[in-house]
């Protein structure tokens, strides 16, 4: 099963979701972590856990949810054909 974990920071994903990511990988699932680029250490930690990483653009200081709807990240999760998606930020819910 292909599972997407969507977040707004790779560091938070590697810190708080690492146990879940490892369990999903041990169970044989393909895990794709999606976060904005910028934290090489956290991205390396996610890769070490067996997850692949995809970057997406995010205006972290933006206040307009309509601008989030226009970002290119709306298209690629559908191309991944994931069986499940988990997200924990309000911005992630705009997908």
Image (tube, rainbow, N blue to C red):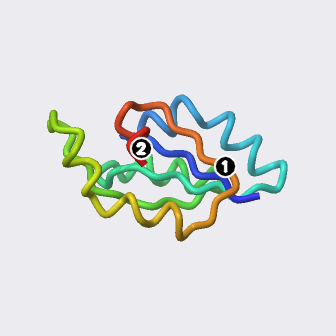
56 horizontally vs 49: left or right: left
Number of on-image labels? 2
Foreground pick, 52 / 73: 73
Q: Residue at x 29, y 50 (%)?
A: 69
Element under disc 2: helix
Callouts 1 and 2 close, C-beta under 8 Å: no
**Image quadrant assignment for residue 66:** top left
Q: Residues within 10 Å of mark 2 (few under 14, many from 20)?
A: many
Element under disc 1: strand
Q: Which residue is mark 1?
A: 84
**Quick one: quadrant of the N terminus?**
bottom right
Foreground pick, 46 / 92: 92
Q: CA distance from mark 1 to mark 2?
A: 19 Å
**Image quadrant assignment for residue 29:** bottom right
69 horizontally vs 59: left or right: right
Mark on residue 44? none
Q: Residue at x 70, y 55 (%)?
A: 83
Q: Position of residue 58 (x, y in %)?
A: 26, 49
Q: Position of residue 52 (x, y in %)?
A: 56, 61
Q: Position of residue 34 (x, y in %)?
A: 46, 52
Q: Position of residue 74 (x, y in %)?
A: 39, 58
Q: Which label lies toward us, 1 or 2?
A: 1
Q: Which residue is mark 2?
A: 10
Q: Residues within 10 Å of mark 1 (few under 14, many from 20)?
A: few
């Amino acid at each position: 099963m292909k599972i997407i974990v969507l977040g707004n920071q790779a560091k938070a994903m590697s810190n708080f979701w690492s146990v879940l990511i490892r369990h999903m990988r041990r169970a044989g699932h393909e895990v794709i972590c999606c976060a904005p680029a910028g934290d090489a250490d956290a991205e390396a930690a996610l890769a070490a856990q067996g997850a692949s990483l995809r970057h997406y653009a995010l205006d972290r200081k933006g206040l307009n949810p309509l601008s989030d709807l226009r970002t290119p990240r709306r298209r690629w999760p559908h191309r991944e054909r994931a069986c499940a998606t988990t997200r924990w930020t309000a911005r992630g819910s705009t997908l």
